[in-house]
Image (cartoon, helix red, strand yellow):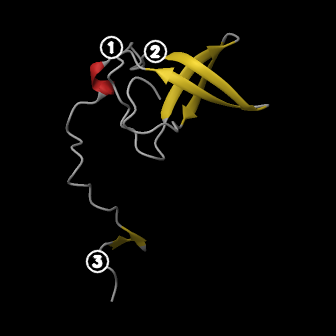
Amino acid sequence: MTNPTAVNGLASQPQVSEYVNYSKSNLFDQVEKDENGQFKLKVIKKDKLTHDSYIYELEFPNKEWISGLWPGGHFHLHLEVNGSNVSRKYTPISLINRKGSV
């Protein structure tokens, strides 16, 4: 007998937790964005770990905001470096309920 919750041999996604209301607006709905849907964050701390790895702390426009980003989630950062546009994924290591920055 096959598993009725499996699709193509893979288990289906778990149901969304009843304790999290994903319909509430989040900080990304509240901040003013440019024509590309992007907004600026201020780098308030930069710690060098190795010759090519850093930990950044980014400040939100409102000190009361939290990212609410779940473990494994990430932001897409866009910046200009030496005249070239660069895009990188950034995975915060801060707590999901930390106020004001990630």
The amino acid marked with disc number 2 is: Lys
Kindly check if marks 1 and 2 are in contact, taking CB atoms under 8 A apart as contact: no
Relative to 32, say whether 88 is above or below.
below
Q: Residue at x 24, y 47 (%)?
A: 20
Give how far apart the Cα atoms at labels 1 and 2 are. Answer: 9 Å
Answer with the quarter of the image where residue 23 lies.
top left
In the rendered image, residue 81, in percent from the top left (x then y), is placed at 67, 15
Residue 52 in the image, given as x and y percentages of width and height: 75, 31
Q: Percent position (x, y) of residue 27?
A: 31, 26
Work out which residue is located at the far top of the displayed protein and give it: 83
Indicate which disc, 3 or 2, sits on the residue closer to the N terminus. 3
Q: Alpha-carbon distance for marks 3 and 1?
A: 44 Å
Residue 48, quarter of the rendered image: top right
- Amino acid at pointer 3: Pro
Q: Nearer the viewer, residue 94 or 15?
A: 94
Instruction: Name the residue beneath numbered marker 1.
Output: 32
Q: Which residue is mark 2?
A: 40
Which amino acid is tagged 1?
A: Glu
Give the foreground label among 3 and 1: 1
- Which of pointers 3 and 1 lies earlier in the amino acid sequence? 3
Closer to the eye: label 3 or 2: 2
**Nearer the N terminus, badge 1 or badge 2?**
1
Where disc 2 sits, the SS reads: loop
Relative to 71, residue 79 above or below: above
The residue identified by callout 3 is 4
Residue extending farthest right: 51
